[in-house]
Image: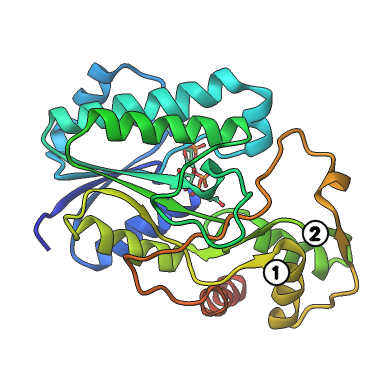
Amino acid sequence: MGFKNIVVVGAAGMLGQELVTHLRGKGYQVFPTTSETLNLLVTEEEMKEKLEPFQPEVVIQCAAFTNVDACERDPDMAMAINKDGTNKLGLASQHLGAIFAYISTDYVFDGLKSEPYLPGDRPNPINTYGLSKYYGELLTSEQLEAYYVIRTSWLFGIHRNNFVQWVMDQARQGKEVKAAEDWVGTPTWTGNLAVAIETIINSGQYGVHHAADAGAISRYEQALHICRMAGLPTDSIRRVHSSELGLPANRPQYTPLACPDLAVPSWETGFQAYLSQYQQQTRVL
Ligand SMILES: NC(=O)c1ccc[n+]([C@@H]2O[C@H](COP(=O)([O-])OP(=O)(O)OC[C@H]3O[C@@H](n4cnc5c(N)ncnc54)[C@H](OP(=O)(O)O)[C@@H]3O)[C@@H](O)[C@H]2O)c1
């Protein structure tokens, strides 16, 4: 470990919580910030003032406006948080001599490829969320010296609601699960992603990286798999075309990520680990 002090921005989010726990367990001095303690809508100067007392060597930017359909409805807010907020945070981090690690998304791609996307493939976002995240990437790479852009996809973890959790809740209650057969991606467990992020920020290989679990699966197949592995009935899962969902934002159809810089576990093993965490948590509650 070449550094000790890490600030995790967006630490109350699904990934942020997992990352703080993981990095603390590995002995780093971690300073979590939330939208209350470091909001991405404040000025770069205010961000510097908030960050300075932590003497950060690395700043990991997990905060984002992540609701894809809400971003479509409010593009100004999407840009203010995901593009401008990331940019100000990156510049403030650089000013303080910290390495900046920006968590980005498979949604920067248009989904028209027929094999997994590589870090060097050309982004071409097709919705506002993807565009705002891509601008965050561009400004990071154009303006910073020491940075990592870490793209990931289809996250699930115990700290917040997500597709996996929703499918299990719906299936348990016998409620319909409409799952698109034409969206294919790589589900990624936040526990595996936290390990991958630690590896990447220690690599010294600045630039764009992919960090996702291994595999490619449609939302429909994923929903079936989740229920089978969790011992839940599958009869309420309905195979649909995404157009039937009537969502405001378009989604790229095919966005599995190839991760040439990492040895990644399969998403199924991530799901098993998630499931035992989830079952332990629900037993305690
Ligand atoms: N979820 C996925 O499937 C997925 C896939 C690919 C990439 N990613 C990327 O992975 C990262 C983490 O995602 P996640 O799923 O963990 O997100 P999340 O659970 O939605 O958490 C995002 C966090 O960002 C914070 N935030 C929102 N607006 C903010 C603002 N103006 N100032 C400061 N903080 C603000 C939120 O704070 P509050 O708690 O106060 O609202 C929240 O804690 C994001 O960069 C996302 O783009 C996610």
Q: What is the spatial separation of the Cα atoms under label 1 and label 2, in whole angstroms? A: 9 Å
Q: Is residue 215 above or below residue 33?
A: below
Question: Which quadrant is home to the C terminus?
Answer: bottom right
- What is the tally of numbered marks visible in this picture? 2
- Look at label 1 and name its amino acid: Gln
Q: Residue at x 9, y 58 (%)?
A: 2
Q: Quadrant of residue 125?
A: top right
Q: Nearer the viewer, residue 57 or 37?
A: 57
- Look at label 2 and name its amino acid: Ala
Residue 40 seen in the figure: no
Q: Quadrant of residue 76?
A: top right
Residue 12 is left or right of residue 205, and the answer is: right
Circle 2 residue: 179
Residue 216 image position (x, y, % from top left) = 60, 68
Label 1 Cα crowd, 10 Å radius (few <14 / some 14-19 / many 20+): many
Residue 85 is left or right of residue 91, and the answer is: right
Q: Residue at x 47, y 37 (%)?
A: 64
Q: Is residue 265 above or below residue 285?
A: below
Q: Residue at x 43, y 39 (%)?
A: 63
Give the structural element (helix, strand or loop) at label 2. strand
Please report whichever mark, 1 or 2, sits nearer to the chain's N-terminal start.
Answer: 2
Residue 262 image position (x, y, % from top left) = 34, 69
Q: Is residue 20 above or below residue 146?
A: below
Give the structural element (helix, strand or loop) at label 1. helix
Circle 1 residue: 222
Question: Which quadrant is home to the N terminus?
Answer: bottom left
